Image (cartoon, rainbow, N blue to C red):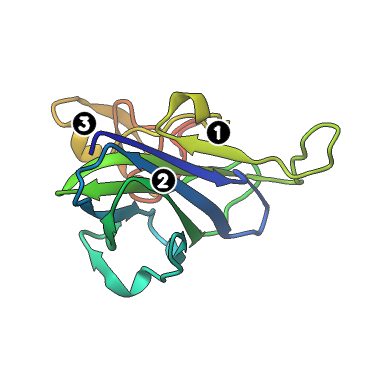
């Protein structure tokens, strides 16, 4: 895999009471071998979240959920077929546990896997707000893009760290998650169990 860009386009702001995160994930691959590569999509989701839709929109129209393989309690992998150079597009919907105004959550880490190696990733994080955020002067809902291309990474909730197991050798942070009490590791942006943001006052 020589060049791959993964971009997730979605609204990062959910009204209080909303649970569904809807995203379009666009993947562009180039300089692959002439025979192509067998690719999979790997999704990490927090405790209580459910992938309710994962459909290829381009070039095909396949529902990928039927071929799901669970890797662990939080991670599921979906076969995506043989890829050649070009663009692919997927529709993704994730149902999250409800949260209150001002809460943030990592909804998923959407990764592309080739030969058991992650070759591209687009984390999707959301924040619950009391009202819809509009683009100034347009009246249209705000949209954000999260991508492994820094030029596209404008999600206001900030970057997510990699999964905890990649932080081996680093001392754990001296605080638990304010929602589920899982001990956080240094550098964690979101809880590795429930996906909640690891900022703000500690839970008393």
Camera sees residue 178: no
For the point 86% across and 32% down, the residue is 137
Apparent side of residue 147 relative to residue 141 in the rendered image (left or right): left
> How would you rate the neighbour count of disc 1 (Cα within 10 Å): few for under 14, some for 14-19, many for 20 or more?
many
Apparent side of residue 19 relative to residue 82 in the rendered image (left or right): right
> How would you rate the neighbour count of disc 3 (Cα within 10 Å): few for under 14, some for 14-19, many for 20 or more?
some
- Farthest residue to the bottom: give it: 66
Q: Secondary structure at mark 2?
A: strand
Q: CA distance from mark 1 to mark 3?
A: 23 Å
Quarter location, residue 13: top right
Quarter location, residue 181: top left
In the rendered view, tell whether residue 144 sits above or below residue 23.
above
Residue underneath mark 2: 27
Q: Position of residue 31 (x, y in %)?
A: 27, 37
Residue underneath mark 1: 155
For the point 62% across and 46% down, the residue is 11
Earlier residue among tags 1 and 3: 1
Residue underneath mark 3: 167
For the point 25% across and 38% down, the residue is 164
In the rendered view, tell whether residue 168 sits above or below residue 35.
above
Earlier residue among tags 1 and 2: 2
Q: Position of residue 149 (x, y in %)?
A: 43, 29
The quadrant the N terminus occupies is top left
């Amino acid at each position: 895999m020589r060049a791959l860009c993964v971009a997730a386009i979605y609204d990062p702001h959910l009204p209080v009471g909303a649970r569904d995160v809807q995203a379009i994930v666009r993947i562009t691959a180039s300089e692959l071998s002439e025979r192509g590569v067998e690719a999979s999509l790997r999704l990490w989701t927090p405790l209580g979240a459910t992938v309710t839709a994962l459909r290829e929109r381009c070039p095909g129209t396949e529902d990928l959920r039927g071929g799901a393989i669970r890797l662990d309690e939080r991670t599921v992998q979906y076969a995506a077929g043989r890829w050649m150079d070009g663009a692919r597009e997927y529709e993704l919907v994730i149902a999250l546990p409800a949260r209150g105004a001002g809460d943030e959550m990592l909804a998923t880490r959407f990764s592309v896997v080739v030969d058991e190696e992650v070759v591209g990733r687009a984390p999707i994080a959301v924040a619950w707000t009391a009202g819809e955020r509009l683009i100034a002067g347009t009246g249209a809902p705000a949209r954000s893009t999260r991508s492994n291309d820094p030029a596209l990474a404008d999600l206001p909730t900030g970057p997510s760290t990699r999964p905890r197991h990649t932080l081996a050798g680093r001392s754990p942070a001296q605080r638990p998650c304010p929602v589920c009490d899982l001990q956080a590791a240094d550098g964690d942006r979101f809880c590795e169990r429930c996906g909640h943001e690891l900022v703000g006052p500690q839970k008393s």
